[in-house]
């Protein structure tokens, strides 16, 4: 197994430490479990993950435009 270094805020480290102590595991084991839970086919496709965002934006129904005339050099 290879290792990496990750810098986390103190609050996150405290939460990880509390969970690790409560479950009798190391912080590294808790982090590995969390990472494994969010990686791979079991986590779903991008479409499934972002599906709840569809239609969440308000705005014009017209396609976005970039009026380049405004930006032409004279």
Image (tube, rainbow, N blue to C red):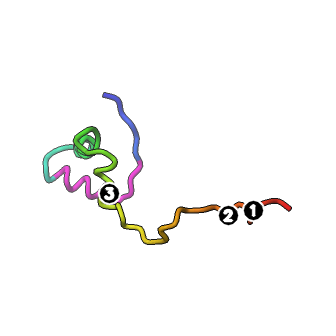
Question: Image quarter for residue 10?
Answer: bottom left
Q: Dot 3 corresponds to which residue? A: 12
**Region of the chain picked out in magenta, as a range:** 7-21
The residue lying toward the viewer, choosing from 26 and 62, is 62
Q: Is residue 13 left or right of residue 74?
A: left
Q: Is residue 12 left or right of residue 67?
A: left
| Cβ atoms under marks 1 and 2 closer than 8 Å | yes
At 34% from the left and 61% from the top, the residue drawn is: 53
Q: Is residue 24 left or right of residue 61?
A: left
Which circle, 3 or 2, is nearer the viewer?
2
The CA span between labels 1 and 2 is 8 Å
Q: Dot 2 corresponds to which residue? A: 67
At 36% from the left and 33% from the top, the residue drawn is: 3
Q: Residue furthest bottom?
A: 59
Instruction: Locate the N terminus and report the quarter of the image it occupies.
Output: top left
Which is more N-terminal, label 1 or label 3? 3
Which is more N-terminal, label 2 or label 3? 3
| Cβ atoms under marks 3 and 2 closer than 8 Å | no
Q: Residue furthest front?
A: 62
Q: Dot 1 corresponds to which residue? A: 71
């Amino acid at each position: 197994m290879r290792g990496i270094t990750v810098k986390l805020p103190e609050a996150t480290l405290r939460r990880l430490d509390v969970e690790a102590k409560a479950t009798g595991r190391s912080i590294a084991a808790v982090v590995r479990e969390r990472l494994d839970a969010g990686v791979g086919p079991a986590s779903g496709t991008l479409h499934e993950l972002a599906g709840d965002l569809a239609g969440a934006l308000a705005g014009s129904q017209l396609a976005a435009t970039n009026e380049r005339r405004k930006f032409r050099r004279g």
